[in-house]
Amino acid sequence: MAGLKDMYDSTDPKKDPGLSSNFGVDYVINYKVPANEKTEAEAAFVQLIKALADVGFATEVRNGDSDSVLVFTQIVSEKLLHKQIYRYRLQDWLYGVRTSAPNKDIAKHLEEEPVTEAERLRLAYLLITKSKNEGGAGIAAKTGQWKYVDSIFPLHDHVFNKNWIKEWSTKYKLEDSDLDQIRYKFGEQVAFYFAFLQSYSTFLLFPAAFGFGAWVLLGQFSWFYAIVNSLWSVVFFEYWKVKEVDLAIQWGVRGVSKIQQPRPQFQFESEAQDPVTGELVKVYSPWKRLQNQLLQVPFALACVAILGSLITVCFAIEIFLTEVYNGPFKQYLTFVPTIILTALIPTLSTILTGFAEKLTHLENYETEDAHKAAFVQKIFVLNFITSYLGIFLTAFVYVPFGRVLAPYLSIFQTTAQRFTTAGKPLPTKKFDINPDRLTKQVIYFTVTAQIVNLVLEVVVPYVKREVFKTVKDVHTDLTSSKKHESRYKDPEEEKEFLARVRNEAALEEYDVTIDYREMIVQFGYLSLFSVVWPLTGCSFLANNWIEARSDALKIAVGSRRPIPWRADSIGPWLNSLAFLSWLGSLTSSALVYLFHNGRAGPDGSPSGIRAWALLLSILLGEHIYLVVQRVVRHVVGKMDRPGLQKERAERFAMRKNLLQETLGQDLTEEASGPGFSGGEKITREALEEEARRESVHGHGTREELFWQRQRGAAESIQIGRSIIADVAGNQTKTAKK
Amino acid sequence: MAGLKDMYDSTDPKKDPGLSSNFGVDYVINYKVPANEKTEAEAAFVQLIKALADVGFATEVRNGDSDSVLVFTQIVSEKLLHKQIYRYRLQDWLYGVRTSAPNKDIAKHLEEEPVTEAERLRLAYLLITKSKNEGGAGIAAKTGQWKYVDSIFPLHDHVFNKNWIKEWSTKYKLEDSDLDQIRYKFGEQVAFYFAFLQSYSTFLLFPAAFGFGAWVLLGQFSWFYAIVNSLWSVVFFEYWKVKEVDLAIQWGVRGVSKIQQPRPQFQFESEAQDPVTGELVKVYSPWKRLQNQLLQVPFALACVAILGSLITVCFAIEIFLTEVYNGPFKQYLTFVPTIILTALIPTLSTILTGFAEKLTHLENYETEDAHKAAFVQKIFVLNFITSYLGIFLTAFVYVPFGRVLAPYLSIFQTTAQRFTTAGKPLPTKKFDINPDRLTKQVIYFTVTAQIVNLVLEVVVPYVKREVFKTVKDVHTDLTSSKKHESRYKDPEEEKEFLARVRNEAALEEYDVTIDYREMIVQFGYLSLFSVVWPLTGCSFLANNWIEARSDALKIAVGSRRPIPWRADSIGPWLNSLAFLSWLGSLTSSALVYLFHNGRAGPDGSPSGIRAWALLLSILLGEHIYLVVQRVVRHVVGKMDRPGLQKERAERFAMRKNLLQETLGQDLTEEASGPGFSGGEKITREALEEEARRESVHGHGTREELFWQRQRGAAESIQIGRSIIADVAGNQTKTAKK
């Protein structure tokens, strides 16, 4: 890391030349050799190099960390690369991702549209990982035959990264060009995250400003704030849905989610011929999958039970300690529940996330996307509980039912008494509901927790890495005085480069899911609870400015370079967003009804609450939300957008070309509009001629006779006129009678 | 009509040869000549024939009814027809309606896919009606220059019609082949109506059977029935949404709604160049349109006010007369409100529908589809009020609030007293809420009204036609002893044919909207109120069996042959369906809560109703509905469907062809699957050779040196092995220490 740090500090790119070039390496494979498994590792290593060579990779081998070998790979044949790229682009066209077909001459086509870095890397990765019968090397890290392959990663472009971080740290708003840069380097999947973050942060300006105003003028629990906030969340959601499609079109990735990537881990029960295509397809019984999917229900219940009871118990202890207990050590004891929660929640979360992952594996999806969506769904449930349950308890249990439930808190009193001087009752005070509790809690989650999160995300991994590295260095120094007493020392001119690669190999994989999750949870606080504390928006706005930069930093120096996957949306998170936005309409209206304007009675609990009025508020809130959503969707749908316009232009050009090819120049002009068609100008003479010709070899059927009574339009006109004269004459006669 | 009737009665197709052939006529134009406008009519007539001839129609003129001329048209040039058909098919392909491009050779293509009757008729109609600069004749019936053109219609295929009616009257279920027949004759728009009717009727089997069971076992207002009924409506809706797409694919019309037909009546403010295509486009300010669209709000309010107050007043009078009044003529007086309603509602509906049409014209849409959707939206509001408001009043006003509102009924008493013997109070009885009222009303709407409707739809137009025709004949006989004392008598062999065409010209235009409306309103009763009377489903099932036949009869003998438009869905009615299905979850739960199990108190009004419990029922009902909807949507979405499979097969074939064309045979095999690509087998030798060649004219940059250290895979393997040995050695040493 020292090298990287120096590099990002210094302004002279020459200072550390190991960072300025990637030596044309496409991917680095970090091959770990565990002690005592030398023979197997060696055999598998030979297979690895052979498999890579078979699909067209050149390889170079170097020393890795003390227990690993680094394999550098490069697609060796330009021709192979071009053919593959061309093929993928053709596939894109066939699936409707590209509007126009690639030029039929490969060389010419690649001149028109050169291969991008992201494309090359994506292709190389697919070549390495795809199964052998699909034409790849079939190398899947950490599984089966390839269990010694620790990771397969591309190398960072540190010159770019440095500029990127530097640039971003000095400007407020990310522009389209910034997103394009990310897209070229890290793929559309990462770019979509930043696009979402950017759109969301820009939209946050409104709740920040309006929230500040509401806080000053309206106070907490304002009807008006709740409605405006809900409206905002609808507008944002609908805007993003459209923006997402628009970006996908602009980035040329619309519909890539249709091109499904098969999951290498997919287990099939049988192979069957596809009735349509005649291909062999792998089949897994959907009923079995459904059975496994049903396990989600007990899983969700277990999550609610485990996390819920933990949170509830801690909550109750805290209430007891702060509101009832009045004995010794009170100031220290009040921290106990927080400490328990802080210690246990992340642990439990990790365990449950592990379970969620296992469950998702059990469900055995055929494609990466389906797998990811199912996993996201599960961790959304987890995060929903850990993030919002506490506030729900305060708002909808503690405050309204506190009076009723308080006596049950005596259980803690009884328990506590056992451990203290027997017989002497613990000093308590009268239980009063603390109406500020809700506000405090919301502020904690929307300010303190966000800051803590940021620190955990940026500082902790850095410290961890440094400590880990130091330990490792010390360890290596202890085991062998000379590091790598290998016959193969690093060549002098590669020394710095290899050191840097070893550093990058030690980094963690970047997972965009984690970043999305954070943003969606944040959106949830705003939508569900910001009516409690209208400054929420301000806090998030500040947080997100830093967040965008810290995420960039995380990608650039804290993680291995991500594989530049494509994506055409933020995927399953869109549903979570919709759910939170809708739920916000319910919670906001309930909160407003419960806490608006001094509902708090003398003992702190709200008074005068009527169940029907509460339900009516919720019902109204929800339906206003649904109506507004419809209207906003309609209006947003009407707006013209650059992406759609681009698509329209491309389609138009394509149509024009195709028509020109097929029908020839003369017909194209009129044929291009939506209602296209054109009447050939057929003169009356031609028609009459045709009719006459017909009559010459007419066979005299009734039908032919019918059409030959009037020869051409002129005769029709003549006869029509006389009929009209007759008709009019008749009518006039009648009128005169 | 006599001819038609005979024909459908007789079994001998030879009996009336005028019905067995259409003489190759594509369209008949009925040209009305009003008295005193002879000169203008004549001039316009000349223009008409010229315009038709210009776009390639042969014309024949014959006597029409006493005041009209019939113009028979036929596309004269096969070549023109084929070119036009080809062009439309090409357009379909470009818009994604067809999966495969038509063969580049027109003649060959038409051999593969001959022109269908519907296609020919549709094309001919477009040629007649499209504006001149789009290559048509620009003839729009009853507008501007063409105000004398009364109608433009194709001729019925009576041989087909006869078989159709005969066949349907003897079988229960319409099959796919029946729908195909309709499609070939009357276009997809009509076929979609029958497909919907068929699907809906088949689905009705369940509520009919279950409803009967519920009626016997559970009685009225059963929770269980309400839930099952709601579930049914969700399943039906989701099924239809999928089925609709599926049918559209099978019929090859998926996406035709994207090919928008410009509305000839569209008024533009200015013309502007399209930034993308460079075409001149007609522009109408969206703000102006929005302003006009906003008029919908006062319109809807006016409808509610006018129809609502009428219904409310009649309702109140009825209540007064039946439940309070006890004086003379009671048995006659109770019919008064029904008579008022029966007389006024249709009149008001017609007037308001006229308004709705004007409003829609004001909104000035560019395309036929947008216009139609806006109109349907408005008449849905109208129909909602006239159909359901009465029951809503009984269920949610009369029963729960009857006690409170009864005293206000004394206004009628006071009024009535003025007209009777002064001073003597009218005899009244104590007001009791009649709990059967709701049931009676629902039965009225779901049985009596359906039968009345059927009669109105089938019998009345027939009688009207016959009476009208007799009057006309008498009139004609009076005015001129010889009918049509024209110089142009009907030729003997055309006499019967022309008589039949004159009959068809006198028929009304078929409007599928009216039939859809009826079915949607019916679905509404089932969804909203069938919990009141579970036999509803049985009644509807019986009704719909007749409905399908009577609708067929209406098309075959009661209307002019419809123009075979295409459609890819039931269009705007889908929204109405969704709305009614959702609203059903609210009303059902409210009805169940209000009327379940003897809630009726001693005076007939329900007792023990709690507002919060009512609201909770509604809230629960709605959210159960929403959750079920999600689940059903997911499950239905997973099912494999014939249409989708067909599409997949076509796409697969297309891809395979295209790939073969572009890449050549060898690459196609592997490239056809979704994750296509293929590794060229590059041998290690080739790689090494390449590397060596590189090294020969290598310039010795760091990068080149890097890749030349190991010459080929063999060397990589060798060096890798020794590194592994070292690594393992080091580790073992450490372990031993």
Image (cartoon, coloured by chain):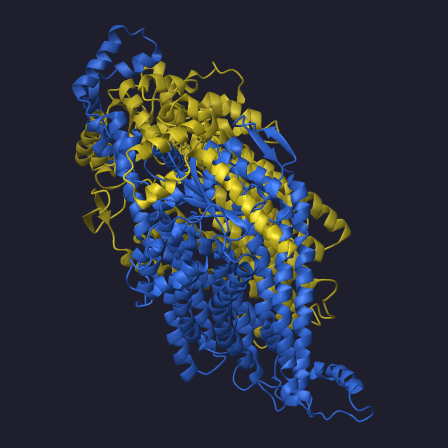
Chain colours: A yellow, B blue
Q: Residue furthest right?
A: B423
What is the quadrant of the C terminus of chain B in the image? top left
What is the quadrant of the N terminus of chain B in the image? bottom left
Image quadrant assignment for residue A82: top left
**Rendered residue at 21%/16% (across/down):** B711
Q: Position of residue A621 (x, y in %)?
A: 63, 60
Q: Is residue A54 left or right of residue B477?
A: left
Q: Position of residue A709 (x, y in %)?
A: 39, 40
User: For the image shown, how many numbered marks are present on the structure?
Assistant: 0
Between residue B407 and residue B91, name the one nearer to us. Answer: B91
Between residue B729 and residue B373, name the one nearer to us. Answer: B373
Q: Position of residue A182 (x, y in %)?
A: 48, 29
Q: Position of residue A260 (x, y in %)?
A: 34, 41
**Rendered residue at 53%/49% (across/down):** B68
Image quadrant assignment for residue B382: bottom right
Is A69 placed above or below B512 here?
above
Is A451 placed above or below A221 here?
above
Q: Is residue B529 left or right of residue A666?
A: right
